């Protein structure tokens, strides 16, 4: 067989690189498919008029980057297991820029590791009239003016801080500001030294997981739970122990009697259902962790927003035996694009956390940390929180009122706090997935648990009747219009 390869003497790239680039482009364009045979290096060198060694070196590079495989005594073939995402569209020109080589897990010819990932956003939903997507703050409320002021001021005064490595645990000023904020806001009393700045909760899950999970070690998760955390634990080889939740949160009587687990929980506003873990159960959960040497990973992702009563103390605030690792994020109250969050580590783990953070990425960007520290210590953060809390409360009220107006009495969970609530659909309605499909057809985005990044372990848990509605990124008018449209779509 012959490959259509054109070599140019005038090209700056070596002949070997030109052969490599063109065969790779044929694979990525789909012109060569998995398992397609390739000419032998002897045939290729004869066809192209290059030395055999040039062809051999080009093939060796394609093999080492995982594009092709050689089978001894049989021949050379296109690798069968390139992921779909490796391919350009068939209309892409052959000279399309090189895609990064797929990462390999283990030897050159091992298949790619198949990791499950959560959904962050769905670009198709941008065209919707109203999208009640969960977990998305109102981008319009980002304090842009104050933020650019702090960034500019820091840039002006930046010396070597801007360019050197600093403490992987994060900028001390920011850690001090967070410690000062956490005590009154969440009842978490800690030293700034216990705080590790991370790239959002997701980075925190990885940090905790890499430190505490070994292949086969037990990890307790809520059932259902947040995919982003469960998939990290799963990817590290943890054995997941799902524990059901009810109206009072995690059913602590179902906790496994195993030593040394990591337990991932969302006590303030359970993800996805929205219920709050009762005080009695908090105490029992802490006692379980002490008894079985477990660490609890408390994800307090949207606790800045509590609309009914005073803010509940975080589980960490009750933690006398230092079994709780607290995770907070600026993704919800500022914006997820910042990629800033924090972990409050038990004292005995602080040094290990710092070292692991160093191994992972040497810490977060200095400039954003500095701006966040200034934004907090100037008092602007507190004012910003109060302002958006009020705005989000009004949006939540608008959603509850619209649901009531169009659907009558609704069974709602999780409306006291957070950025989304959950509606248990009445029996006369189809399943949440079907409601979601009808909504989308009418230009309204609502989420079933699966779309809302929730992981279910029990198909009989009633989760297919739960509809998640994020309300903070829509105006009251958009909320009313969205729910009215949904009602019309469901009637038809
Ligand atoms: C329950 C829960 N925890 C954590 C996160 C992740 O937040 P971050 O942006 O801080 O990684 C999310 C994101 O939506 C979430 O829903």
Image: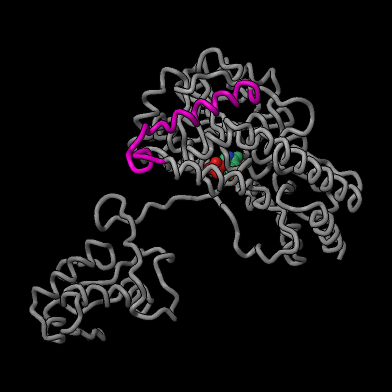
Depth check: 260 or 26 in front? Answer: 26
**Residue placed farthest to the front in the image?**
156
Q: Residue at x 72, y 53 (%)?
A: 132
Depth check: 272 or 471 in front? Answer: 471
Q: Is residue 161 left or right of residue 121?
A: left
Q: Compared with residue 482, is residue 55 higher up or lower down, i.e. above or below?
A: below
Q: Is residue 126 left or right of residue 87?
A: right
Q: Is residue 183 magenta?
A: yes
Q: Residue at x 71, y 26 (%)?
A: 311
Depth check: 92 or 11 in front? Answer: 11
Depth check: 172 or 450 in front? Answer: 172
Name the dominant secondary structure of the magenta segment: helix
Return the x and y of residue 84 as percentages of the image width and height.
43, 66
Q: State how many labels appear.
A: 0
> In which image quadrant can residue 183 be found?
top right
Colour theme = one colour
Return the x and y of residue 186 as percentages of the image width and height.
64, 24
Q: Is residue 81 left or right of residue 452?
A: left
Q: Residue at x 59, y 55 (%)?
A: 121
Asked if one can make out residue 176 in the rendered structure from this viewpoint, the answer is: yes
Q: Is residue 164 left or right of residue 238?
A: left
Q: Residue at x 87, y 50 (%)?
A: 402
> In which image quadrant can residue 221 be found?
top right
Q: Which of the image's four quarters has the N terminus?
A: bottom left
Return the x and y of residue 484 as percentages of the image width and height.
86, 58
Q: Which of the image's four quarters has the C terminus?
A: bottom right
Q: Quadrant of ligand 1?
A: top right
Asked if one can make out residue 455 in the rendered structure from this viewpoint, the answer is: no
Query: In this picture, which residue range is highlighted in magenta?
Result: 158-186
Return the x and y of residue 358 as percentages of the image width and height.
34, 35
């Amino acid at each position: 067989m012959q490959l259509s390869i054109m070599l140019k003497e005038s090209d700056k790239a070596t002949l070997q690189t030109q052969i490599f680039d063109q065969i790779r482009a044929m694979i990525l364009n789909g012109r060569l498919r998995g398992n397609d045979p390739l000419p032998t290096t002897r045939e290729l060198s004869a066809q192209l008029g290059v030395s055999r060694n040039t062809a051999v070196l080009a093939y060796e590079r394609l093999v080492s980057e995982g594009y092709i495989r050689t089978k001894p005594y049989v021949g050379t073939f296109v690798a069968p297991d390139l992921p779909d995402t490796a391919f350009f569209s068939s209309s892409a020109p052959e000279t399309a820029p090189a895609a990064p080589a797929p990462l390999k897990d283990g030897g050159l010819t091992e298949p790619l590791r198949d990791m499950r990932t959560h959904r962050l956003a769905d670009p198709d939903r941008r065209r919707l009239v109203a999208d009640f997507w969960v977990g998305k703050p109102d981008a319009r409320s980002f304090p842009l003016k104050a933020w650019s002021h702090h960034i500019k001021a820091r840039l002006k005064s930046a010396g070597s801080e801007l360019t050197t490595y600093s403490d992987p645990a994060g900028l001390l000023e920011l850690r001090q500001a967070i410690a000062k904020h956490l005590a009154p806001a969440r009842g978490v009393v800690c030293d700034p030294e216990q705080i590790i700045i991370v790239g959002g909760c997701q980075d925190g899950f990885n940090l905790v997981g890499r430190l505490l999970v070994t292949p086969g070690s037990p990890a307790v998760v809520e059932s259902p739970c947040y995919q982003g955390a469960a998939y990290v634990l799963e990817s590290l080889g943890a054995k997941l122990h799902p524990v059901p939740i009810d109206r009072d949160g995690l059913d602590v009587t179902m906790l496994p009697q195993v030593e040394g687990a990591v337990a991932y929980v969302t006590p303030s506003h359970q993800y996805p259902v929205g219920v709050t873990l009762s005080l009695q159960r908090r105490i029992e959960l802490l006692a379980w962790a002490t008894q079985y040497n477990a660490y609890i990973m408390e994800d307090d992702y949207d606790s800045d927003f509590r609309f009914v009563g005073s803010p509940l103390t975080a589980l960490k605030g009750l933690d006398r035996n230092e079994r709780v690792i607290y995770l907070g994020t600026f993704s919800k109250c500022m914006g997820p694009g910042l990629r800033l969050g924090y972990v409050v580590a038990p004292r005995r783990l602080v040094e290990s956390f710092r070292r692991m953070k160093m191994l992972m990425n040497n810490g977060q960007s200095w400039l954003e940390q500095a701006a966040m520290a200034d934004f907090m210590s100037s008092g602007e953060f507190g004012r910003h929180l109060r302002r958006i809390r009020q705005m989000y409360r009004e949006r939540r009220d608008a959603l509850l009122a619209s649901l009531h107006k169009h659907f009558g009495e609704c069974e709602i969970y999780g409306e006291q706090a957070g950025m989304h609530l959950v509606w248990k659909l009445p029996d006369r309605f189809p399943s949440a997935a079907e409601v979601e499909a009808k909504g989308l057809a009418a230009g309204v985005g609502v989420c079933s648990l699966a779309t809302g990044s929730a992981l279910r372990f029990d198909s009989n848990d009633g989760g297919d009747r739960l509809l998640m509605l994020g309300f903070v990124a829509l105006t009251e008018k958009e909320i009313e219009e969205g729910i009215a449209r949904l009602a019309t779509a469901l009637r038809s």
